[in-house]
């Protein structure tokens, strides 16, 4: 997870509780004007779901390219979408729907020569600050001893210094009121003033000793100076202000956050996942950001918008997704629920293979007792053999890496995904063997997958995503975004965002859900998602 810590504290909290019930008027349909089928599919979808005519945005993006550079993404996708959302007609948009013809992946961001030089200097500065912080920790702990307290955190290792400072500060804050003797209180106040000055002196000395140096800072708050972390001069002014106003630990946290901002490694992402954070002025691109819409995440300074994609290997399959979703929703999805685990030894280590495999097994047991669907399970190491299961309505399994196996035949409207690393590296390449395009070709109407190595914990948990969907209350997009852990990362959702496969016949009741899922259901009032 990205250590933005202090930067996050300095950003205004933009997140707000989302209104309930995603409907046609909450969507923005985004197309590629250079791909005729893109606009045609969006027009058809708008007719089927009664999306307002003004809620369509055509982008000027190169056709037949599944990748887009960060620069082109910023100017040709992110900016037009951001501008639309900020316009009067964009008010109330809660989900951006991308159509066939748009890229699926933003490539890795490359650092300039100047950025790489700054990055080297920042890493050196961070190490120096870590060492200098020990002086501040020693001084704070000396104040604790003066008032008869023992530091709660012991140890002198450099890696422990931040914890020592934060712990000693909390102890002092909690106990200074107990110092009633005037002379002793004055002594403590003098010591604390000395600690503050030491922190500032050490920070300024460390900054002066680097090639980065200090710069003249205008009359501006530190929060204002951190608002442009991609601007080199703003970063330099923020470092100087932190050194002069906060001291060594504050400067260390600023430096650590700037390292994250500049480092271009593992900054590639799915277009859809990156676009979910389009309304934020800036955020680190290294790896992922927590999803503010997730049922597990507390309120966040980030503002997220749902995204979903109506796309497929061919326009014909993409159109089928639209038509199947509307017709099946009206009648209700029927068929089998298929869980394909691997028979691995259980583990309590969250994120491990054994943990996930046991999660699938536990989920299957739970559904056999609660669900109205027939549950089919397989716990062998190999993936279910081709043609084994007929009439699958829901499927989740793992782990056949970029080697699709047609284990099931699927009912119209089926929702299915296979947990593996590279199952959506391409949607349109001929003879692509990934699971996402092949599931779509084999009749699945909603799926998800990764455009690059995502790590296991980036997938929605099947024991959360499917149960929410099975109540018939949240739409496909709502169920996904409530259970997807990460944004600005690798996973993409494909399907009709308004699709509620169990709206006509619920496969689980509210009472069947775990408490946290029942709480999440409160955000999903049943709003009609108009069909034909």
Image (cartoon, grey):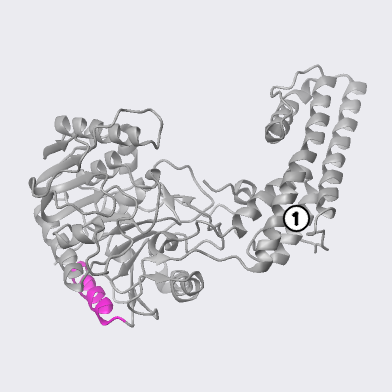
Viewed as shown, does residue 239 lie left or right of 317? Answer: right
Location of residue 180 in the rendering, given as x and y in whole percent from the top left corner: 84, 19
Is residue 41 on the magenta stretch?
yes
Instruction: Name above or below for residue 391 compared with residue 150.
Output: below
- Residue pictured at 48% horizontal, 56% vertical: 303
**Foreground residue among 465 and 263:** 263
Marker count (numbered): 1
> Farthest residue in the top direction?
148
- Residue pictured at 68% horizontal, 67% vertical: 114
Q: Quadrant of the C terminus?
A: bottom left
- Residue pictured at 38% horizontal, 28% vertical: 348
The residue tagged with tag 1: helix, strand or loop?
A: helix
Can residue 333 be seen from the camera position used here? no
User: Based on the displayed image, in which of its 4 quarters is residue 188 positioned?
Assistant: top right
Name the residue carrying label 1: 239
Viewed as shown, does residue 168 lie left or right of 139? Answer: left
Location of residue 513 in the rendering, given as x and y in whole percent from the top left corner: 26, 35
Can residue 513 be seen from the camera position used here? yes
**Foreground residue among 466 and 17:** 466
Magenta region, residue range: 35-49
Location of residue 7 in the rendering, given as x and y in whole percent from the top left corner: 63, 51
């Amino acid at each position: 997870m990205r250590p933005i810590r202090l930067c996050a504290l300095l950003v205004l909290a933009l997140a707000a509780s989302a209104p309930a019930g995603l409907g046609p008027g909450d969507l923005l349909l985004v197309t590629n004007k250079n791909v005729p089928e893109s606009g045609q599919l969006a027009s058809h979808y708008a007719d089927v779901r009664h999306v307002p005519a003004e809620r369509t945005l055509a982008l000027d993006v190169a056709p037949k390219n599944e990748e887009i550079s960060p620069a082109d993404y910023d100017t040709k996708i992110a900016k037009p979408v951001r501008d639309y959302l900020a316009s009067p007609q964009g008010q109330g948009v809660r989900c951006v729907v991308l159509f066939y013809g748009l890229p699926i992946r933003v490539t890795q961001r490359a650092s300039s020569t100047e950025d790489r030089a700054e990055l080297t200097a920042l890493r050196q500065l961070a190490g120096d600050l870590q060492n200098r912080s020990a002086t501040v920790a020693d001084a704070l702990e000396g104040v604790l001893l003066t008032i008869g307290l023992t530091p709660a955190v012991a140890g002198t290792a450099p890696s422990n210094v931040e914890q020592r400072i934060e712990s000693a500060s909390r102890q002092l804050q909690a106990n200074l009121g107990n110092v009633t003797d005037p002379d002793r209180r004055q002594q403590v106040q003098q010591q604390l003033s000395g600690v503050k000055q030491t922190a500032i002196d050490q920070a300024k000395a460390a900054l002066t000793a680097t090639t980065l140096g200090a710069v003249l800072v205008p009359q501006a708050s530190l929060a204002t100076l951190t608002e442009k972390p991609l601007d080199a001069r703003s970063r330099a002014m923020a470092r100087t202000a932190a050194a002069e106003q906060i001291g060594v630990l504050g400067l260390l946290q600023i430096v650590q956050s700037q390292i994250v901002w500049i480092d271009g490694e593992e900054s590639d992402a799915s277009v859809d996942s990156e676009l979910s954070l389009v309304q934020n002025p800036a955020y680190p691109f290294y790896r992922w950001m927590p999803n503010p819409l997730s049922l597990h995440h507390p309120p966040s300074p980030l503002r997220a918008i749902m995204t979903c994609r109506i796309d497929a290997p061919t326009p014909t399959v993409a159109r089928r997704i639209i038509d199947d979703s509307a017709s099946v929703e009206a009648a209700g999805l029927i068929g089998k629920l298929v869980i394909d685990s691997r028979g691995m030894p259980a583990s309590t280590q969250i994120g491990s293979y054994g943990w996930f495999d046991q999660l699938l097994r536990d989920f299957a047991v739970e559904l056999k007792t609660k669900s109205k669907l027939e549950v089919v399970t397989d716990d062998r190491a190999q993936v279910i053999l081709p043609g084994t299961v007929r009439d699958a309505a829901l499927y989740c399994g793992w782990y056949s890496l970029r080697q699709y196996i047609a284990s099931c035949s699927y009912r119209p409207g089926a929702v299915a995904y296979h947990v593996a690393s590279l199952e959506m590296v391409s949607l349109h390449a001929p003879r692509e063997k990934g699971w996402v395009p092949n599931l779509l070709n084999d009749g699945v109407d909603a799926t998800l997958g990764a455009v690059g190595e995502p790590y296991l914990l980036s997938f929605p948990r099947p024991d959360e995503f499917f149960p929410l969907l099975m109540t018939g209350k949240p739409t496909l997009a709502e169920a996904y975004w409530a259970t997807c852990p990460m944004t600005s990362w690798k996973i993409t959702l494909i399907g009709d965002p308004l699709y509620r496969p169990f709206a006509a016949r619920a496969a689980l009741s509210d009472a069947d859900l775990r408490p946290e899922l029942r709480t999440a259901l409160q955000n999903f009032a049943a709003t009609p998602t108009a069909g034909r």
